[in-house]
Amino acid sequence: MKNNVIAFSMVLSLLFSCTQKFPAPGEIKMSWELVSNEYSDTPKAMAKFHIENNSRFTLNDKNWALYFSQMSRTPLSADNNVKIRFLSGDWFVMEPKDNFRLKPGESVEITTEHSEWIIKETDAPLGSYFIFYDKKGMETDTLPVADFTILPFTRPEQANRHKNDYEPIPTAQWNFENNQSLSLLGKEELLPFIPSPVSYKATGSKVIFDDMVSVLHNEGLENEARYIAGFLEKLAGTSPVVKEAPEPAPYSIFLEIKKIQVNEKTDEAYRLQIKPDRSIQITGSDPAGVFYGIQSLLAMLPAEVFKGNNAQISLDEVVIEDAPRFPYRGLQIDVARNFQTKETIKKMIDILSFYKGNYLVIYLTEDEGWRIEIDGLPELTDIGAKRGHTTKEANALHPSYGSGPFACEAEHYGCGYYTKNDFIEILKYAQSRHVNIIPAVNFPGHSRAAIKSMEARYEKYMALGDEENANEFRLIDPDDTSKYLSAQWYNDNVVNVARESVYKFYETVVDAILAMYNEAGIEPEFFHTGGDEVPEGAWTASPMCAELIKSLPKITDPKNLQAYFFERIVEILKTKNLKIGGWEEVALLKEADGEYAPNKKFIGEQVYPYVWNNQGSNADLAYRLANAGYPVILCNVSNFYFDLAYNKDPREPGHYWPGFVNTRNAWQVAPFNVFYTTTHDAMGKEIDIETDYATLERLDANARKNVAGVQAQIWSETVKGKEMLEYYLLPKLIGFAESAWSPERTWETTKDRNLREKEMNIGWNTFANTLAQKELPRLAGIFGGFNYRVPAPGAKIENDKLVANSAYPGLIIRYTTDGTEPTKNSTVYFEPVSVTGKIKIKAFDAAGKGSLTMEVN
């Protein structure tokens, strides 16, 4: 009997092995290693794939392919009988050549060369998956690589972009040297709150609150009263009394509207008084001013309150007067590349409004996704709101940014959109916090998701024999043979501006979105058209565009068809009483010499260029447009692109194509003289600002009024989910808030460079101390808490002693000597201490949130 059971088990095992055609999940193990960026005189990177076959299946030269996403790093070569092909965007495929064999139990190492440097873990291949084929070459099975490891970057040649990379690697010792100008300040030397107010006059006395206050308000401030009452209820666990009243009373917060002027501003201004009778009076020039006075009051609460310790609160007896520097203080979040949920957007509105931001651009459409429901065009979300394995030619979206082969798989972020009800809910939520939502629908470039969706619609109606409906919203010229490659490496992402159906499509989308505003009871103010990065070569071989150009004698270069397109869009949006936003390209025209100049056509037409390019010879671009008469929004890439990595540490996620952006970069901006604060190029080389900027155009004094505001951006190619979004945003947003709201700082107009930089360092020291001692601990609890970044400390070994310091004085530094990861229970560093062994250090804030770990050599 026993022998029969054994024999039967062996037969079952044999049968199972015979029927197991392809590897099971986890049976193919893969790792990836960046070898070097410094081995070549030209920009290149060398990397290695390690593939280990632990299945019973032999990978041969015909039965598999490995697909993966990798940000714009074209593989130039690969060895060991494989080739890598570029497909589209960041989508690549590794395929076997003749004689490839990887038998069960074997492994292979494949060396690849790439066209650009690779210095970040977020540069590694993502979302990799195998496709297996039968003997006829047909796809049969899909296998995501579940066991995938990115080997650590440990050598300088892995972190440096090239031999000519001037940006330092942030080692523990470099951090130490960089932190030398900082010193610990006492609590009385910190900023009262951020962003800093115009005036803060404290008597030196304290006012003690040991019980719940009531909330009294004028008529018309019900929303603001509900806001602060709800906030207090969350902090204390009990609801305050809320009622309309004509005047303040002891132990209350009184909200009122009166005509006030602060720093020559009458919009969004407020006066906040904390009085000895334990009453708090917030007077606003308008409801927004009252709301910002409330936010200042909340920002004055001790951080411990947000952790539930609220038995007694001590506040300064003070009179504060405040108003914003700029009327437009914006944040843009790209939800198209990688989706963010409605709940996440609401949380972003919370923190943006807390730091007194008032505009949120939601980037709803891109090549890689369409994220809003549009009545009558279900294909936009059926096709355009999800990505999965397909072919480039199919009317579907292929994987991007690690989204993998399966549409709508959890934690892959390629799938999702806002229903009409979702968007209406977002609009109402934002309005209650005085945040204006600006929808962005990017045309004529960056339009692949829309194009693929409308081609699917075209095919559907053509199959029904309905050619009229098929062409109603078509976006391409099917006979166009133009050759181009966009900034994100697409050759099929530009709509054909000669088609009338393109304009019908755009207006249909605009009207559908405006209908959501109408249903929400909100008057829309802005519509953002995108308009950036139309690649050279687009429209050059389109018969439809050739016919159009014949009728437009002023257009001699197909590139300037973008100006024609934008003119048509402006006419559509003007009829809807909207301000029109777009990237700087929408306000530029290509001249005969190939240079771009302000297009005078749209001056005075409520067109707002959002100017990101402040690098090199374009450092003055925003000023040229403002001097020409355009109202501009400063979106400086060197300061306000928050998807850029904090520094060059390979563990820090994000882009770095124009350099790196940390919290100080966002804080250290002179909006009216960027030449003072844009001091290094994309490779970290110091700019001679007196010489290199000598011939560039300065902002005219009478054009200052044309700088309408500033905006921070988060593009989402490398952002996967809410946690990463929060890490990228915070605390950079806090530095941005100081640049957007607070009065002009002394150093912004100091001509002497040495004195200016000394003043900057003093100001930054105060700000950094305030971040450590007030702002970061609050972020741990406010609005449910955030995954904010704590900067790594600096350290060195000197005379066998550990010497350490902090990027934000007031953070707690902890260390270990046995090579283990420091935790919030590890030994605290107070002063130089004798050490031996393998030293690791880490910074923690008062809430216990830690930084990256640094090894001290």
Image (cartoon, rainbow, N blue to C red):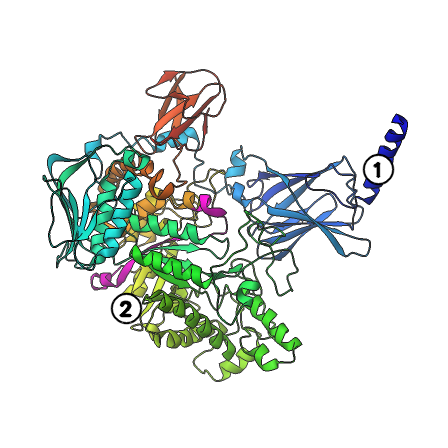
Residue 362: image quadrant is bottom left
What is the quadrant of the N terminus in the image?
A: top right
Residue at image location 83% in from the left, 36% down from the top: 13
Q: Secondary structure at mark 2?
A: loop
Region of the chain picked out in magenta, as a range: 699-725
Contact? badges 1 and 2 (CB < 8 Å): no
Q: Would you say residue 814 is visible in this rendering?
A: yes
In the picture, the disc for residue 12 is: 1
Q: Relative to 379, is 660 on the left or the right?
A: left
Q: Nearer the viewer, residue 845 or 703?
A: 845
Q: Nearer the viewer, residue 570 or 614?
A: 570
Disc 2 residue type (three-letter): Gly
Q: Relative to 56, is 200 on the left or the right?
A: left
Disc 1 residue type (three-letter): Leu
Can you say whether 676 is above or below 381 in the image?
Answer: above
Q: Nearer the viewer, residue 685 or 117?
A: 117
- Distance of label 1 from label 2 (alpha carbons): 80 Å
